[in-house]
Each structure stands twice: as C-alpha cells, then as structure tokens.
Amino acid sequence: MDKKIILLVSALVIIFLGYLGGKSLYENQTREEYRFLATEKSELFVRDYSPRLGDVDAPVYLIEFLDPECESCRAFYPLVKKILKQFSDVQLVVRYAPFHGNSQFAVKILEATRKQNRYWDALEALFQNQPRWGSHHNPQPELIWEIIGSIGIDTEQIKKDMEDPSIAQIIKQDMEDLRTLGVRRTPTFFVNGVPLLDFSYDSLVQLVEQEIAAAKSK
C-alpha cells in the first residue's frame, strides 16, 4: 500500500479515536455536573407539585420534561409506562416543556383535571388523540374538550379550574427550571438527575438499570 495512503488512514484513525475519547469525556463530565445539581438543587428536577406515577417511595426518579403536543412524547409514552411496569423501583415525575403553540392551553387543562383525580386518564387521552387536536398542519385544540369529555371528565368545571393562578405558576416554574437545566427538546429525560444523552429507548432502560443498581448499593 502507498505510504501516503497508510499515513492518511492512520491519521483518520487517530482523529476518530480522539473524537470518541473526547465525546466520552464530555458525556462523563456532563453526567457528573447534572448529578451534582440533583444533589445540591434537587428541586430543579422534582417540584412538590409535579405529577408522579408509580411508587412514591421508589428510590429512582425518571424525570420527563414533556410537551402534550409533541409527537415524540406521544411515541415515548407507552415505552415509559413499560419501564414503570418492568421496574418497581422507579417513579415517573412529569415536568412541562410547552414548546408548541397550543401546549400551555393543554397543560392548563391537564393540571385542572387533577382536581377531579383524572390527570393520567386525561394525559393518555390527549396523547392517543394528539393527531386530531395537535396536528402541526391543522391544529384544533378546541377538540380537547370533546376528547376529555368523552372519558367522563366534567369539562365545564375544568374551564373554571384551569384559570387558577397556581396553574400558571406551575408552568412558569417548569419553564424556568428547564432553562436552568438546558432542556431544549422534548421529551428530555433525567434519571436521578443524570441526563439521557444518547436518545433511545434502549439507552433509557440502560440508564434506569444503572441508577437502580447505584441506589441499591448505597
């Protein structure tokens, strides 16, 4: 093989290995920075008002910043439920990242359903019917009333409850926290404060397993 080609190939291999090493170092530093925040400023990840699903005493917190109008959030929702079913040591904590146009409207309705103890039913109904009300090409948020009404939620009461100033404050606080944490897309996951950097279901399961093992070793 020509010496120039050998040198070129060698240089490319060195550059590639350097990239992998730098990427790994960056990811490790990022995880440790967020882990520190989760220890020192845990309220950035879990607020007292945050909806939770699963055992409230579970040692591992799966924190999801979601947007009810986000298609990826809709796709991940059944996978998140699968994780909760698989791992009893995990509890889901919902935080809001209302980046889409009708998201704050939907979040206000979701929060209001908590007064009727129908939050999780409403969230699932909104995700299931998202193509109807949250289409990016033709959004029709007014259909949300029909959707939640069809599962027995008192929509007239929701219209009153969603104007509670405390709900606007929840949205405001979640948006402040997501900016502090650098959340720029949905869904964004943290597990006990450790961010999911490689966005995939398998990577999320791996991170959950890692944090379960860490919790059990303490």
Image (cartoon, grey):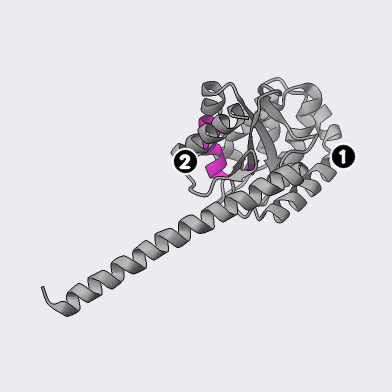
**Position in image of residue 117 (x %, y %):** 76, 22
Name the residue at 71% across, 24% down.
56
Q: How many marks?
A: 2
Query: Which disc, if any, is residue 203?
Result: 2
Q: Is residue 210 visible?
A: yes
Label 1: how many residues lie within 10 Å, few (<14), some (14-19) or many (20+)?
A: few
Name the residue at 79% across, 32% down.
112
Q: Is 95 drawn above or below residue 151 in the view shown?
A: below
Query: Disc 2 versus disc 1: distance between alpha carbons?
Result: 35 Å
Magenta stretch, residue numbers: 65-79
Which of the 4 image quadrants contains residue 84? top right
**Position in image of residue 161 (x %, y %):** 85, 33
Say which label, 2 or 1, has the lower sequence index.
Answer: 1
Is 208 on the left or on the right of 103, as rendered?
Answer: left
Q: Amino acid at mark 1?
A: Ser
Check disc 2 and report its element: helix, strand or loop: helix
Is 43 on the left or on the right of 182, as rendered?
Answer: right
**Position in image of residue 174 (x %, y %):** 75, 46
Query: Which disc, if any, is residue 46?
Result: none
Does residue 72 show up magenta in the picture? Answer: yes
Is 94 on the left or on the right of 187, as rendered?
Answer: right
Does residue 97 show up magenta in the picture? Answer: no
Label 2: how many residues lie within 10 Å, few (<14), some (14-19) or many (20+)?
A: few
**Which is more toward the observer, 182 or 41?**
41
Q: Is residue 102 visible?
A: no
Q: Name the mark nearer the viewer: 2 or 1.
A: 2
**Which is more toward the observer, 80 or 41?**
41
Q: Main secondary structure of the magenta part?
A: helix
Q: Is 188 drawn above or below residue 49 in the view shown?
A: below
Q: Residue furthest left?
A: 1
Mark 1 lies on residue:
166
Q: Amino acid at mark 2?
A: Ser
